[in-house]
Amino acid sequence: MSSMALALPFPGNPGKKWAAKFLLVLVLSVSLVSMGCAVGGAATWINMGLNLITTLLPTIPSLIAAISGLVGKNVLTQAQVDKLTQVFTGVQQLFQQAQTALTQYEANSDPTLITKIQDILNQVKTSLSNVLTDVQITDPATVAKITLIVNSFIDLANNILAILPTVTNGKVTARKVTHGQMAQVTPEAWAARFNEAVQKPSGNTALDAAFSQVHAVPAHAR
């Protein structure tokens, strides 16, 4: 094939112009993938946060019920159950507060609400990070199970924190989030991780039976 057969309809030097355009498109594409993109619009990150919390909240009553069913089965004492119930009830209330603050921000765009949401989610993380020490669980299988569940809740709090805008001197700036991060903050992705944690065999028949009915269902608030 002759070089004339490959000629493109560009004036001047067609080969260089075509190559330059191709290179520009390639560089822009790579930059977008590597840098990520800003979470577009308040409605986007608000909906993402609300969807995650709406998916998580129904798991807590069933989780508390599962924990309560372990009394008298050489897994947990009543005192330990009471303490775990207190912790998870508190976490439920904190997530509900975050849910309310998200809805309020949608209504009035008050930057102080973003800071409030950050504070609430950090309280969730602090409360859960100390739970095993506070409850003093000694059964290895129960420790492993509660650790997986606690980590999944902390993971959800971190997911929401990762998409919240930043606030500097009252100015709200959208946060840049990679495509990989975006894929992690869907209700489906979190529910899958939570269900895997809850249903993972522990080697303790009573423990696995108690948690067999606990599962997350991906939910969309809107």
Image: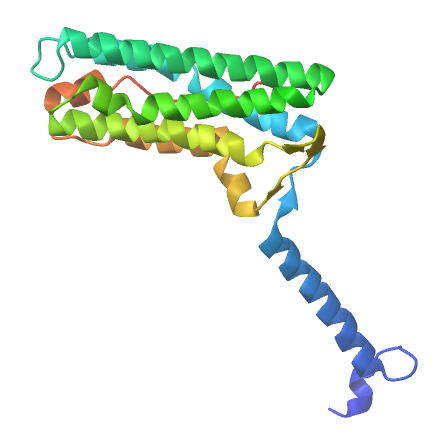
Query: Observer-nearest residue: 144 or 218?
Result: 144
Tell whether 25 sits left or right of 131.
right
Residue for point 53% across, 17% down: 98
Image coords of residue 161 (percent x, y): 52, 31
> Which image quadrant is residue 75 in?
top left
Residue for point 27% across, 9% down: 65
What is the number of callouts on the image? 0
Image coords of residue 33 (percent x, y): 60, 54
Color scheme of the displayed model: rainbow
Image coords of residue 187 (percent x, y): 49, 28
Image coords of residue 62 (percent x, y): 32, 12
Q: Where 91 falls versus 13 (above or below)?
A: above
> Which image quadrant is residue 170 in?
top right
Q: Quadrant of the C terminus?
A: top right
Q: Residue furthest left?
A: 74
Residue for point 67% across, 33% down: 168
Q: Where 207 falls versus 164 (above or below)?
A: above
- Say if residue 217 shows up in the picture: no
Q: Residue furthest right?
A: 11
Q: Quadrant of the N terminus?
A: bottom right
> Which image quadrant is residue 155 in?
top left
Tell whether 182 sits left or right of 30.
left
Query: Observer-nearest residue: 42 or 94?
Result: 94
